[in-house]
Image (cartoon, rainbow, N blue to C red):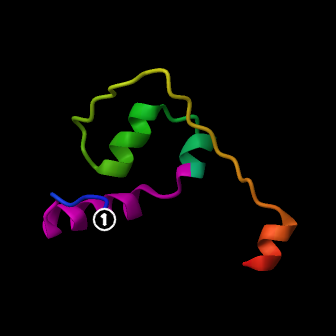
Amino acid sequence: TPMPDATEDEISQIEKSIFEAGAISKMLDENLTLLEIAKKVTGDKEVKVLKEDIMPEYKCDCSKEKMSKA
């Protein structure tokens, strides 16, 4: 379980926030900062960044071979 200590209410709130935030790829296209993305995805305006040197990027390692097996 990814969040064993989370209550059902907390998980529901996180799921709702993720749904309302929209696609991460769109946020990256809009050049949102890591902090802005974290706030949107979590719905928590008090989010604190613990590590600054992370650069989010959008990429896909798909290949025609992988897609044909899907």
Instruction: Give the total of numbered labels.
Output: 1
Task: State whether residue 61 is above or below residue 55.
Answer: below
**Rendered location of residue 42, percent (x, y):** 31, 49
Task: State whether residue 49 is above or below residue 63.
Answer: above
Image point (28%, 59%), residue name: 14
Viewer-side residue, 49 vs 21: 49
Image point (71%, 53%), residue name: 60
**Rendered location of residue 40, percent (x, y):** 37, 47
Image point (43%, 41%), residue name: 37
Image point (74%, 53%), residue name: 61
Under circle 1, the secondary element is: helix
In which quadrant of the rendered image does the N terminus lie?
A: bottom left
Name the residue carrying label 1: 16
Q: Which residue reaches farthest right? A: 64
**Rendered location of residue 5, percent (x, y):** 15, 57
Viewer-side residue, 6 vs 44: 6
Using residue 13 as the reference point, say whether residue 23 is left or right of it: right
Task: State whether residue 59 is above or below residue 68.
Answer: above
Q: Residues within 10 Å of mark 1 (few under 14, many from 20)?
A: some
Quadrant housing residue 4: bottom left
Task: State whether residue 61 is above or below residue 16.
Answer: above
Using residue 5 as the reference point, say whether residue 14 is left or right of it: right
**Rendered location of residue 64, percent (x, y):** 86, 67
Q: Which residue reaches farthest top? A: 53
Q: Amino acid at mark 1?
A: Lys
**Which residues are the magenta region?**
6-24
- Name the chief secondary structure element in magenta: helix
Q: Is residue 13 magenta?
A: yes
Viewer-side residue, 16 vs 66: 66
In which quadrant of the rendered image does the C terminus lie?
A: bottom right
Using residue 47 as the reference point, say whether residue 23 is left or right of it: right
